[in-house]
Amino acid sequence: MEITFIIVVFAIGFIGSFISGMLGVGGSIIKYPMLLYIPPLFGLAAFTAHEVSGISAVQVLFASIAGVWAYRKGGYLNKQLILYMGGAILIGSLIGSFGSSYLTEQAVNIVYGILAVIAAVMMFIPKKQVDDVPLDEVTFNKPLAAVLAFVVGIASGVVGAAGGFLLVPIMLTVLRIPTRMTIATSLAVTLISSIGGSAGKLVTGQVDYWPALIMIIASILAAPLGAKVGKRMKTGILQVILAMMIAGTAVKIWLDILM
C-alpha cells in the first residue's frame, strides 16, 4: 500500500506541476481536486480539505521556484508587476492561511469553489489584442494591481493555493498584460504568495510532511518541463486549456458541496 501511495501522490504532483509550468499557475487549481478525489479511487485513505490545502501550499512554493527559473530569460518577467502584486499578495496569503485553521472542511471547499467559478468566468472573457503590445512597452494600473493581489492572497491562502489560477485571468483581462509575460510573471507572484501561504499552514499544523515531500520532488522535476512546452505552444491554445480545466474543476467541486 505504501508503494501505491507514493506512486499516486507522485503522479498527482508531476501532472499538476507540468501543467502549472506550462500555463503559469501554481497548480493548486488542478492538484487540490486531484488530492481530494484520486487517492480513494486506489483504496487509499482520503485526505481532509485542511491536509490538501497544507500539502498544496508547500508544494506550490517549489513548483513556482522551478517555473520561474525556467522563464528567467527572454524578458517575460515584469519586475514592476512582481513588486506591486507580490508584496500585496504576500500579506493577503499570510492572513488567509492563518485564518483557514478556524474554518470547517466545508468552508474551505466552498472558498475553493467560489475561486474556481470566478477564474473560469474570467478566462472566457474575450481578450482584446493584449499580445500585440511590445513587452518593453507594457503598462498597468498599479493601485488596482495591488488591491486585486491582496484580495486574491487572502482567498487563496485559505485553500493553500498561491492564487496563480486567479492571477492569470486578472492579468490578461483586467490589467491587459500579454499572455507570455502573464504566464512568467504570475509564476513569480505565485512564488511570493506561496511563501506566505506555506508559512501560515506550517505554523498552524496543517501540513502532512510525507506526501508534501513526494509532491515537492515531483514538482521540481515536472514544472521546468511544462515551462519548456508552454514556450512553444500558441498563446490561444494555452488560454483554452486553462479555461477548460478551471471550469471542469469548478463544476466538480460544486456538485460535491451541493450533494
Image: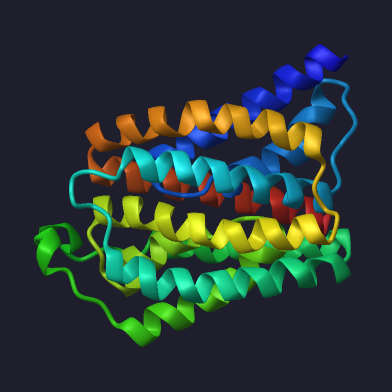
In this rendering, is residue 11 above or below 78? above
Figure disc tally:
0
Horizontal and vertical percent position of residue 48? 86, 47
Q: Nearer the viewer, residue 123 or 51?
A: 51
In this rendering, is residue 45 above or below 111? above
In the figure, residue 230 lies in which quadrant?
A: top left
In the figure, residue 217 lies in which quadrant?
A: top right
Residue at 38%, 46% (x, y): give it. Answer: 68
Location of the N terminus (image quadrant):
top right
Report if residue 96 is visible in the image. Answer: yes
In the shown orientation, is residue 152 left or right of residue 124? right
In this rendering, is residue 81 above or below 9? below
Residue at 14%, 59% (x, y): give it. Answer: 135
Horizontal and vertical percent position of residue 39? 79, 29
Horizontal and vertical percent position of residue 90? 55, 69
Q: Nearer the viewer, residue 129 or 28?
A: 28
Residue projecting furthest to the bottom: 143
In the figure, residue 102 lies in which quadrant?
A: bottom right
In the shown orientation, is residue 163 left or right of residue 231? right
Residue at 79%, 67% (x, y): give it. Answer: 100
Indicate the colouring scheme: rainbow
In the shown orientation, is residue 126 left or right of residue 157? left
Residue at 42%, 52% (x, y): give it. Answer: 187
Horizontal and vertical percent position of residue 235? 25, 45
Report if residue 113 is visible in the image. Answer: no
In this rendering, is residue 61 above or below 4? below
